[in-house]
Image (spheres, grey):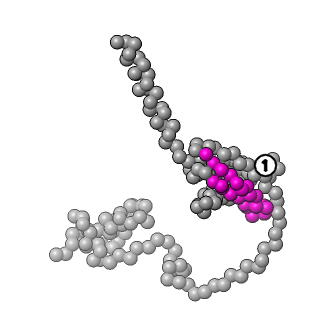
Amino acid sequence: MFKLTYPIALILLLLPNFSLLAQETTAEISGIIKENVLPVSDVAITATHLPTGTKYVTVSRQDGRYNLPNLKIGGPYSVAASFVGYKQMKKDSITLIVGQAYDLNFAMTPESKTLDNVAVHASTQGKVFNANHTGPQEVVKRDHIMDLPTLNATVKNLAELFPSNNNFNKVKQVDQVLDVPATPNV
């Protein structure tokens, strides 16, 4: 009896491990962006899956490292690294397999360009952005306050519903200043 149950228990313990291996269906591209030996941060890395046109974009961190996780398997991929003041670097014909962590490093080379003139044109102030709108605002009428589904229809109850409100102590003061009745007039 012991000889029969031991192999069955062993099979049952190993079976979940094999099913976990089959769950991964993507790949990853990662690497380091450097200029000579120094890391370059804020470099835009774009991987394009050429058959579908799907683009994956990330930015290099302070240490120059970047990651593009959850990429479709297959390819070919075209990966480009670009940043202002540097020549764009590109690597083509990258094919990924399931679970692969493809290592792709770029050595950036400085490049200077003359930019065209920039013209800025101003117009009158619009309804949304103007000098009178300096922060979040909510227009509230007395009817809104009275229609609140609470026992005490007050400005405080209404202000608690606004996402822009983050300080309820000031709301208490406003409630007292407005002298809104605690119960609606029926």
Whether 176 is drawn above or below 64: the answer is below
Point out residue 18 in the picture as x, y percentages from the top left corner.
48, 33
Secondary element at image label 1: strand
Residue at left 29%, top 72%?
145
**Was residue 93 drawn as part of the magenta stretch in this picture?**
yes
Q: Nearer the viewer, residue 106 or 76?
A: 76
Choose top left, top right, bottom left or bottom right for residue 123.
Answer: bottom right
Query: Is residue 94 shown to the viewer in this render?
Result: yes
Which amino acid, by three-letter code, is at mark 1? Leu
- Dominant secondary structure of the magenta stretch? strand
Q: Quadrant of the N terminus?
A: top left
**Was residue 125 drawn as part of the magenta stretch in this picture?**
no
The furthest residue to the bottom: 124
Does residue 35 appear left or right of residue 60 in this picture? Answer: right
Residue at left 66%, top 45%?
102
Point out residue 15 in the picture as x, y percentages from the top left corner.
44, 30
Q: Quadrant of the C terminus?
A: bottom left
| Label 1 sits on residue | 38
Which range of residues does the magenta coloring cover?
Answer: 75-97
Q: How many marks?
A: 1
Q: Nearer the viewer, residue 37 or 54?
A: 54
